[in-house]
Image: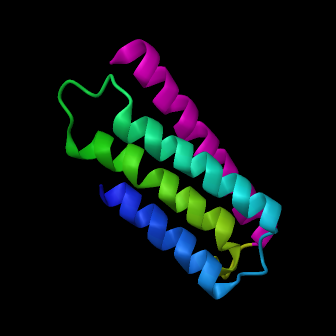
Amino acid sequence: MIAALLYIVTVGFYLFTNSQKTSLKEAVICMAVMAIYCFWHLTIPPFAATPNFYTERAFGVVPFVSMWAILFPHFAINQNPTVTRILGWIGLGAMTIILAIFKLFVW
Protein backbone atom coordinates (compact mmCIF):
# COMPACT_ATOMS: atom_id res chain seq x y z
CA MET A 1 0.00 0.00 0.00
CA ILE A 2 2.87 2.35 0.76
CA ALA A 3 4.35 1.60 -2.66
CA ALA A 4 1.13 2.66 -4.39
CA LEU A 5 1.02 5.88 -2.39
CA LEU A 6 4.68 6.57 -3.12
CA TYR A 7 4.06 5.95 -6.82
CA ILE A 8 1.13 8.40 -6.88
CA VAL A 9 3.11 11.05 -5.00
CA THR A 10 6.11 10.66 -7.33
CA VAL A 11 4.03 10.90 -10.50
CA GLY A 12 2.10 13.85 -9.09
CA PHE A 13 5.33 15.61 -8.13
CA TYR A 14 6.70 15.08 -11.63
CA LEU A 15 3.54 16.40 -13.28
CA PHE A 16 3.16 19.42 -11.01
CA THR A 17 6.82 20.48 -11.16
CA ASN A 18 6.81 20.11 -14.95
CA SER A 19 10.38 18.87 -14.95
CA GLN A 20 12.02 19.56 -18.30
CA LYS A 21 15.16 17.55 -17.52
CA THR A 22 13.59 14.28 -18.68
CA SER A 23 11.79 13.86 -21.97
CA LEU A 24 8.08 13.16 -21.76
CA LYS A 25 8.47 9.89 -23.67
CA GLU A 26 11.12 8.62 -21.26
CA ALA A 27 9.06 9.74 -18.26
CA VAL A 28 5.93 7.96 -19.49
CA ILE A 29 7.90 4.76 -20.16
CA CYS A 30 9.44 4.96 -16.69
CA MET A 31 6.04 5.51 -15.05
CA ALA A 32 4.52 2.60 -16.99
CA VAL A 33 7.37 0.22 -16.12
CA MET A 34 7.15 1.24 -12.47
CA ALA A 35 3.36 0.78 -12.43
CA ILE A 36 3.73 -2.72 -13.87
CA TYR A 37 6.47 -3.46 -11.35
CA CYS A 38 4.32 -2.29 -8.41
CA PHE A 39 1.31 -4.26 -9.63
CA TRP A 40 3.41 -7.38 -10.11
CA HIS A 41 5.18 -7.04 -6.78
CA LEU A 42 2.10 -6.28 -4.68
CA THR A 43 -0.71 -8.33 -6.23
CA ILE A 44 0.53 -11.32 -8.20
CA PRO A 45 1.49 -14.42 -6.17
CA PRO A 46 3.69 -16.14 -5.12
CA PHE A 47 4.98 -13.97 -2.30
CA ALA A 48 7.93 -14.56 -0.02
CA ALA A 49 7.21 -17.34 2.46
CA THR A 50 8.93 -15.47 5.27
CA PRO A 51 9.19 -11.81 4.33
CA ASN A 52 11.80 -9.86 6.20
CA PHE A 53 12.87 -6.26 6.47
CA TYR A 54 15.68 -6.47 3.91
CA THR A 55 13.78 -8.15 1.09
CA GLU A 56 10.86 -5.75 1.48
CA ARG A 57 13.22 -2.80 1.41
CA ALA A 58 15.07 -4.14 -1.62
CA PHE A 59 11.93 -4.82 -3.64
CA GLY A 60 10.06 -1.77 -2.36
CA VAL A 61 12.53 1.11 -2.06
CA VAL A 62 15.25 0.45 -4.64
CA PRO A 63 12.91 0.67 -7.66
CA PHE A 64 11.59 4.01 -6.42
CA VAL A 65 15.11 5.37 -6.05
CA SER A 66 15.69 4.33 -9.65
CA MET A 67 12.44 6.01 -10.71
CA TRP A 68 13.49 9.23 -8.99
CA ALA A 69 16.89 9.04 -10.71
CA ILE A 70 15.17 8.78 -14.09
CA LEU A 71 12.52 11.45 -13.53
CA PHE A 72 14.62 13.92 -11.54
CA PRO A 73 18.27 13.56 -12.64
CA HIS A 74 19.03 17.16 -11.66
CA PHE A 75 18.83 16.24 -7.95
CA ALA A 76 22.22 14.52 -8.25
CA ILE A 77 24.20 17.75 -8.17
CA ASN A 78 27.69 16.36 -8.71
CA GLN A 79 26.69 13.89 -11.41
CA ASN A 80 25.95 14.26 -15.09
CA PRO A 81 22.14 13.94 -15.66
CA THR A 82 22.65 11.45 -18.48
CA VAL A 83 24.70 9.17 -16.22
CA THR A 84 22.07 9.48 -13.48
CA ARG A 85 19.29 8.48 -15.89
CA ILE A 86 21.29 5.53 -17.21
CA LEU A 87 22.00 4.30 -13.67
CA GLY A 88 18.30 4.68 -12.88
CA TRP A 89 17.34 2.53 -15.87
CA ILE A 90 19.93 -0.08 -14.91
CA GLY A 91 18.57 -0.18 -11.36
CA LEU A 92 14.94 -0.42 -12.44
CA GLY A 93 15.72 -3.08 -15.03
CA ALA A 94 17.84 -5.11 -12.62
CA MET A 95 15.18 -5.04 -9.89
CA THR A 96 12.50 -6.06 -12.38
CA ILE A 97 14.59 -9.00 -13.58
CA ILE A 98 15.43 -10.03 -10.00
CA LEU A 99 11.76 -9.82 -9.02
CA ALA A 100 10.83 -11.97 -12.03
CA ILE A 101 13.42 -14.59 -11.10
CA PHE A 102 12.21 -14.69 -7.51
CA LYS A 103 8.53 -14.84 -8.48
CA LEU A 104 9.04 -17.57 -11.10
CA PHE A 105 11.72 -19.78 -9.60
CA VAL A 106 12.48 -19.08 -5.92
CA TRP A 107 9.22 -18.37 -4.13
Q: What stretch of residues is rendered in magenta?
A: 80-107
Magenta residues, dominant SS class: helix
Horizontal side of residue 88 vs 58, given as left or right: right
Residue 25: % across, % down:
81, 60
Where is 60 relative to 80, above or below?
A: above
Decide if residue 91 is in sight here: no
Where is 25 relative to 63, above or below?
A: below
Q: Is residue 90 magenta?
A: yes
Check the picture and name the quadrant holding the N terminus.
bottom left
Residue 24: % across, % down:
79, 67
Q: Residue at x 20, y 24 (%)?
A: 49
Horizontal side of residue 80 vs 17, given as left or right: right
Q: Residue at x 37, y 64 (%)?
A: 5
Decide if residue 62 is in sight here: yes
Asked where in the image residue 73 lies, by quadrant, the reply is bottom right
Residue 102: % across, % down:
42, 23
Q: Is residue 2 magenta?
A: no
**Front-most of 88 and 21?**
21
